[in-house]
Each structure stands twice: as structure tokens, then as C-alpha cells.
Amino acid sequence: MLTKENLQKLAKEKLSDYHLVVVSNREPYIHVIKEKQIKCIKPASGLVTALDPVVKACSGIWVAHGSGNADKMVVDEANTIVVPPGVDKKSSTYTLKRVWMSKEEENGYYYGFSNRGLWPLCHIAYTRPIFQHSDWMHYANVNERFANAILEEIKGKQAFIFIQDYHFALLPKFLKEKRPDLNVAQFWHIPWPNPEAFRICPWKKEILEGLLANDLLGFHLRYFCDNFLETIDREIEARIDRERFSIFKEGKETLIRSYPISVDFEETSSLASSKIVQKEMEKFKEEFDLDDKFVLFGLDRLDYTKGIPEKLRAFDRFLEKYPQYIGKIVLVQKGTLSRIHIQEYKNLNDEINSLVEKLNWKYSNNSWFPVLLTRRDLNYEEILALYNLADVCIVSSLHDGMNLVSKEFIASRNDEDGILMLSQFAGASSELAEGSIIINPYDTEEFAEKIKEAIEMPKRERCKRIKNLRQVVSENNIYEWISKVISDLADLKNNYK
Ligand code: GDG
């Protein structure tokens, strides 16, 4: 099993004479004003967990949108700050460079083209993408601004640029136009759809050409890589080399590879056994009155791709069919509010509220309610506590690049108990099918039956399943993910020499 320490060594060896630059929309450290003081927050994110130690080991640079309300107050004239704050060893710090944008730009680039356009385009969840010319213009401008910020920071030196996600489809091209010698890789964290779905995008050619400026382009699954190759085949003039799994456009090669992302298994597992998590479990048990009840648990951003209404409908059907469970089971659903400026997300929020209200009205008796929906911010310890209180963790995504919740749940269950119900449309199902209960969230009847199967499964069978799953996740942890990307990047560097 690859550890954080091995990974740091590997990154240092392989990337030593190059600057490592990570680019993402969200920053790894955010400065905010709280109680009249400037505080630095490290957002809970799998990506930050994985990349932070690597960027530290290489004393690299991280370029991201400065979104905190105190971000501007702490940077120097180049808009940079050394992070994490308060650490003075050079080998344990890196430079965070912040890129600014106005509300209007953020609305066009982030809420607009990225999340009203590309997000629904890439997820087959039957939410129609909205393409607006002004959003596209902001998207292109912001991508160019990121390119300029990166070039300014590396100052003509050799560098590996590792770009995260769909917010930056044009960035590789802007970089390569000015610095063709840079090594540029990008990881697309969401699905790549089939060519039929992708072809409606008015700027499809620009997006594909932007992405083909990468030397390496990664997706979670081989299936998404296949879709990407098919899309290229249909939409632009380029040669596809199916043996090398790469694309040649005007003599330039882009390797297409799959790297299934994961979690920090060891850290999650050891934190899950800590006293603080035990305490949180006791608190939740009391607050939610969970003793002697079957607990179903869901943790999702409130996003229409996550299948939350489908989960509620299946639970409704389950209670309808099996009333003997009334009063003996609860569904605890944590829903993190997300992208709430977008109308579809507001509608989803309303739909979920009304479904929960309907279910609770229909089945409640005395002080028991079947659904406990909470939106309050939870820290990771609280999340681990809820994973450990769950008899069943339900991931019912309609379409999901990977889904880290499923892997975190598995990593947290040191007691080797608990069932994962996993949508066949989550990328994670390609690794975790054996051991979890696979569902089709669109099939309410079958979903309801599988809830019954899950809660009635004998303990021996449950243990056998989760043991297998823990083996899979511990072997393919987050450090494996990033080390594979780094090794492939380093091979590219050798090709360039
Ligand atoms: C995208 C792709 C892909 C949630 N609520 C709280 C909280 N979380 C954390 C979870 C988990 C993460 O958020 C959610 O990750 P997912 O992978 O499930 O989903 P997306 O946000 O849609 O991520 C996805 C991922 O990128 C990585 O490539 O797997 O397919 O859509 O880590 O624990 N964390 C805390 N409080 C909360 O209330 N601390």
C-alpha cells in the first residue's frame, strides 16, 4: 500500500528539477474573517488531502480562485502567500497564488458555463444544459487569466502543470500557445458523456481543441476515456491511436488515461477509531434517537446528479410495502447546500423538502419520523461518526464520475460491518460492485426491495462483503492515484528530453 511518505519521496525524485504547479478552481487554504479576526481554513476535500503533501514535497505552486473574504488582505503584490501558515520549513510549504474575479465573472465562468453548461452536459441526469454566449466569454477570459497567472509565477522555468477539472477546458491551450515546452496534464473529475450527448454544445470544437493541448488527459474510468476518443472521432480532425490510447492532432500527441480516484484509507480508518469519533457517535445516537433502529445514511451535496429524490421515493415505497418496519428504521440524510444561485438547484432543494415533509407526515407516529434531513455543516469526525452509525450507506447517484462517499464509508468501518448500497451509475461501482448491493436508482420497486435485502442481510455475509471492499479501497488509495499520474507525467518529461 502506498503511503503519504512514499508518495512524497516519489514526487521529489520524479519531478525534482521541474516546478510543480497544481491548478484548481477551489483553493486549498481560504482566508476568512471570523469574529473580527483573519482565520485560515483548509476545506475538507479529497483532492486537497491528496495533492497538498505532493505540492509541499516539491515546494510547488498552487493556483486557484481567491474566494475567501480575507484572501486579498494576506497576499503579497504577486497575489501569493506561503501555506500552510505558521510553518517555516521550506520543505513543508508551498506558494498559493490567488486569481481574482468579479461577481459577474464568477457568475459567467463558474455558475454559468461550468455549472449550468458543462456539468449537466457531462452528467446524463436529464437536466438540460444552458449555454449562454456571455457565460462562454467569461469562461474563456477566466481561463486565459489563469494561464497568465501561471506563466507569471513560473517565470520562464521548466514546469509540470497539473490542472483539475472541467472549469479549465481552455487553459491547456492558452498555456501551450505561449509555452509549448511546458508539460501539461489535466484530470477531468466528472464523467465524459457519449458523443450524442456532447454534440449539442455550441463550443464543442473549442473545448476539444483546448483539451487536446494537454500532454496527458485523465478520467476516472476507461469508459469515459472511450467516450472521449469517440467524441474526438466524430467532432474534429485528429488521428486516434487506439493501441497507445492517444490522440494526434497536428503532430501533437495527447495521452488519454484512466486513474480512478480514491480516499486516504489509512487516515480515514485511524480517525474513525478515535475517541472523538466515538463521542460524536454517542451524541448523534442521542440527538437522532437512533438506539434500536436500523439506520440508513446518505451524504450528498444537494445536486440533481446524486439521486436524492429517487432515494426518498424508494424509502417511501419500502415503508409502504413493509409496514412492519415503521418506527424501527430511519433514513439520516445529510445534504450539503451547493450552487444555490442556480435555479435547478433551488428547485431540487424544494423538491427534497416536500418529499421529506410528505414522508414524515405519512408515516410518523408519536415522536418517530422516518427521515432526518440535516443541512448543517459537519466536520469530518462527525461524518465518520455517521458512517459508523449506519447499517446501510446509500449512494444513489444518477450519474457520478467516481463518488468518494462510498469509499470513505468503507474506509471508516473498522468494525467490518455495514452495507454499501451503490448506484450502478456511480464510477465507484466499477471497483466496488463485488461486495456492495448495486442499485438502479430509477427503478423504485427494485430499490425498495434492495433496502429490505440490505437490512435483513445476515451479519456473516455483511462482514464478508465489507472485508473485501476494504481490501480494494486500501490497495487503491488516493496516494496510488496521484503516484500513477506523477509517474506518467515523469515519463512524458523523459520523452521531451
Ligand atoms: C466530484 C465528482 C468525484 C460532503 N458533505 C460534507 C463533506 N462532504 C464531502 C464527502 C466527500 C465529498 O464531500 C463529496 O465527494 P463526492 O466524490 O461524493 O462528490 P462531488 O463533490 O460531486 O465530487 C465525483 C469527485 O469529484 C472526486 O474526483 O468522486 O464523482 O462529482 O469527501 O465526505 N465533508 C465535510 N462536511 C460535509 O458536510 N467535512
Image (cartoon, helix red, strand yellow):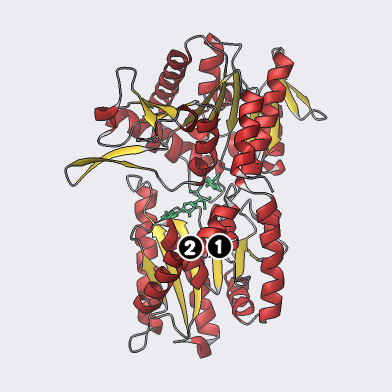
Q: Is residue 281 above or below residue 94?
A: below
Q: Earlier in the sequence, mark 2 or mark 1?
A: 2
| Marks 2 and 1 in Cβ contact (< 8 Å) | yes
Q: Name the quarter where the C terminus is drawn.
A: top right
Judge the density around disc 1: few (<14), some (14-19), many (≥20) Cα neighbours within 10 Å. Answer: many
Q: Quadrant of residue 280?
A: bottom left
72 left or right of 65?
Answer: left
Instruction: Measuring from the top left, give residue 170's x and y in whole percent.
Output: 51, 23
What residue is disc 2 on?
384
Secondary structure found at label 2:
helix
Secondary structure found at label 1:
helix
301 left or right of 485?
Answer: left
Q: Is residue 268 above or below residue 296?
A: above
Q: Quadrant of residue 318?
A: bottom right
> Which residue in the rendered view is the most extreme toward the front?
89
Judge the density around disc 2: few (<14), some (14-19), many (≥20) Cα neighbours within 10 Å. Answer: many
Q: Is mark 2 within 8 Å of ligand 1?
A: no
In this view of the protein, which residue sits in the foreground, 352 or 474?
Answer: 474
Q: Is residue 357 above or below residue 62?
A: below
> Which residue in the rendered view is the most extreme toward the left?
36
Q: Residue at x 55, y 34 (%)?
A: 54
Q: Quadrant of residue 473?
A: bottom right
Residue kind at label 1, given as amino acid type: Ser
What residue is disc 1 on?
412
In this view of the protein, which residue sits in the foreground, 95 or 206?
Answer: 95
Residue kind at label 2, given as amino acid type: Leu
Q: Residue at x 30, y 17 (%)?
A: 77
In this view of the protein, which residue sits in the foreground, 380 or 374?
Answer: 380
Instruction: Measuring from the top left, give residue 483's x and y in whole percent.
Output: 65, 37
In this view of the protein, which residue sits in the foreground, 288 or 426?
Answer: 288
